[in-house]
Amino acid sequence: MRLIREALTDADIRHRLTVAPNGMEALNLLHRVGSDSTKPQFELIFLDLNLPKKNGREVLAELKTDPRLKHVPVIVLTTSKAEQDVRESYALHANCYVTKPLDFEHFIHTVRWIEHFWLSVVTLPGGAANDS
């Protein structure tokens, strides 16, 4: 998440980033925020598969069964290139699977592309997309 925060800052992307240190806190945060509304307060979720307490697969499975959150795009951003991880992520309805680039400049480019595509190009349910 530190690299994503740095990449967003370096790319001059002005979206608020909320970070959860583990899967349990991520789910608590996602369920709590916007609990008084039917519209989720998150436009995009970056999810690592290797989270402590609840791994990314468990978080993804729970997100995609929540009626308020299931339409929020989930970008699996992980170091794994394992075919099984890719298949499992898509089977759990991940919207995109991206292997983290090792080079920081490439990582910045990747984060910029993800942000532009998901928050500027794509039309999301409920008008969640931005006109950035």
Image (spheres, rainbow, N blue to C red):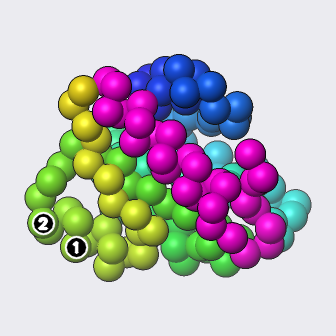
First to last magenta residue range: 104-132
Q: Secondary structure of the magenta portion, mostly?
A: helix
Q: Secondary structure at mark 2?
A: helix
Which of these two is toward me, 47 or 35? 47
Q: Is residue 120 magenta?
A: yes
The residue wearing badge 1 is 87
Report the number of discs: 2
Within-10-Å neighbours for mark 1: few <14, some 14–19, many 20+:
few
Q: Secondary structure at mark 1?
A: helix
Does the CB distance between marks 1 and 2 fall below 8 Å?
yes
The residue wearing badge 2 is 83
Residue 47: % across, % down: 43, 50
Can residue 44 be seen in the rendering of this structure? no
Residue 20: % across, % down: 53, 36
Report the side of 13 relative to 78 (left or right).
right
- As shown in the figure, which amino acid type bears the numbered disc 2? Glu
Within-10-Å neighbours for mark 2: few <14, some 14–19, many 20+:
few
Residue at the spot 56% in from the left edge and 47% down from the top edge:
115
Q: Is residue 72 magenta?
A: no
Residue at the spot 35% in from the left edge and 33% down from the top edge:
107
Where residue 3 sits, quadrant-wise, is top left
Query: Is 85 above or below relative to 30?
Result: below
